[in-house]
Every structure is written in structure tokens, then in C-alpha cells.
């Protein structure tokens, strides 16, 4: 079973095309609501490949799906505070790009995942397992803490569950201070 969580509508289109050419079951997750455009039409989506933004040495942010645009905004906010971060966007959660995750953990020594899912059994758990088995570093997760989402619009839920640039910056600073 492959699991995909594209970051925007362009990537979603490419994920559907890739899925149609793939053997076996695939689950494609797509949040309801408007998505910011991250990738243009020339984006080369590849099952199992992550995409890195930035070469920071202080912290690695890891995101998938709708949280990638939020993480990109946080990347810019961290840079304004002189924190050198990098972002890994994982549109394919299974299989994950373990090599890119490990390479970034080695380069920064701290990892923060941001996902619109439970941190149990989701992206946070996956990245934590990969890092702990291959190159243990300090790690934390922003996600749902074993609770249900709300029957509300996306923007309200993101704020309600503290999926904000400010929270990502705060958690990033806390992790960096623990290194």
C-alpha cells in the first residue's frame, strides 16, 4: 500500500497520473478547502521522493499535504529570525524518502514534523521511527494529539489546533535550544 499526501493541486494532478501507472493499492489524501500553489506545472512528482527547500543547518522541518505551504511560510519566518532551517516536503508518506530524512537529520541535529493528522501513526511517527533507527536526533511533532478534527472549515481548524507559523517558530526554537 502506498500513501500519498500532495502539497497542492498541481502535485495532486501529478500524483493521480503516477498512481494510474502504478500497480497495487494507493491511498491519496487530499484536504478539503483551498490550497496555496507551491509547484508549477513543470513539477516532477515521483512516488517515494521527498523535496528539499533550503539548506539550513539549525533545524529540519518535515511536512506533507496542506501543511507544506504553512511550513514554507515558517521557513521564511525562521530565516528572518536568523535561524537557518530546511524543509522536507514528503508527498509520499509510504514509501518515505528515508535517505533524505536521514541526510537532513545529520545536517541539522533537530527535526520538527508538521502534519494535519494524528502524530500517532502518521507522518510524525514515521519520521520519528526513521530518525531513531538511523541517526537519533532531537525530534518533536506538531499534529493532532490523539483527538478528532472538527466539523469546521480548514482555516478555523488550523488555528484551533495551533497549526500556525508562530507555533512552528516557537517549537523550532525550543528544539534548537535542546541540541
Image (cartoon, helix red, strand yellow):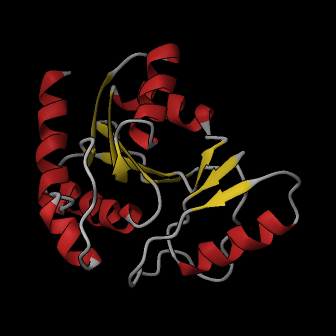
**Please, is residue 112 above or below residue 110 in the view?**
below
Tell me: 19 left or right of 124. Answer: right
* Percent coordinates x, y for residue 50 in the rendering: 59, 50
**Please, is residue 1 above or below residue 106 in the view?**
below
Q: Identify the residue at horizontal 63%, vertical 43% (top origin).
A: 94
Looking at the rendering, which quadrant does residue 178 occupy? top left
Of residue 111 and residue 15, the one placed in the foreground of this image is: 15
Q: Identify the residue at horizontal 35%, vertical 20% (top origin).
A: 137
Tell me: 9 left or right of 127. Answer: right
Of residue 51 and residue 145, the one placed in the foreground of this image is: 145
Looking at the rendering, which quadrant does residue 14 occupy? bottom right
* Percent coordinates x, y for residue 118 in the rendering: 35, 45
Of residue 147 and residue 47, the one placed in the foreground of this image is: 147
* Percent coordinates x, y for residue 29 in the rendering: 55, 63
Screen quadrant of the C terminus: top left
**Please, is residue 105 above or below residue 159 in the view?**
above
* Percent coordinates x, y for residue 153 in the rendering: 26, 80
Amino acid at each position: 500500500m502506498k500513501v500519498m499526501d500532495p502539497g497542492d493541486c498541481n502535485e495532486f494532478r501529478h500524483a493521480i497520473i503516477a498512481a494510474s501507472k502504478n500497480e497495487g493499492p494507493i491511498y491519496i489524501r487530499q484536504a478539503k478547502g483551498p490550497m496555496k500553489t507551491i509547484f508549477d506545472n513543470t513539477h516532477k512528482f515521483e512516488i517515494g521522493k521527498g523535496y528539499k527547500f533550503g539548506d539550513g543547518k539549525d533545524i529540519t522541518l518535515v511536512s506533507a499535504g496542506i501543511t507544506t505551504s504553512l511550513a514554507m511560510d515558517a521557513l521564511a519566518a525562521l530565516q528572518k529570525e536568523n535561524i537557518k532551517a530546511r524543509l522536507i516536503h514528503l508527498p509520499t508518506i509510504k514509501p518515505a524518502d528515508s535517505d533524505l530524512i536521514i541526510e537532513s537529520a545529520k545536517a541539522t541535529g533537530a527535526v520538527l514534523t508538521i502534519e494535519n493528522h494524528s502524530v500517532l501513526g502518521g507522518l510524525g511517527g514515521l519520521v520519528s521511527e526513521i530518525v531513531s533507527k538511523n541517526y537519533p536526533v532531537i525530534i518533536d511533532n506538531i499534529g493532532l494529539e490523539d483527538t478528532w478534527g472538527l466539523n469546521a472549515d480548514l482555516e478555523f481548524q488550523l488555528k484551533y489546533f495551533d497549526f500556525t507559523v508562530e507555533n512552528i517558530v516557537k517549537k523550532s526554537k525550543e528544539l534548537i535550544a535542546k541540541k
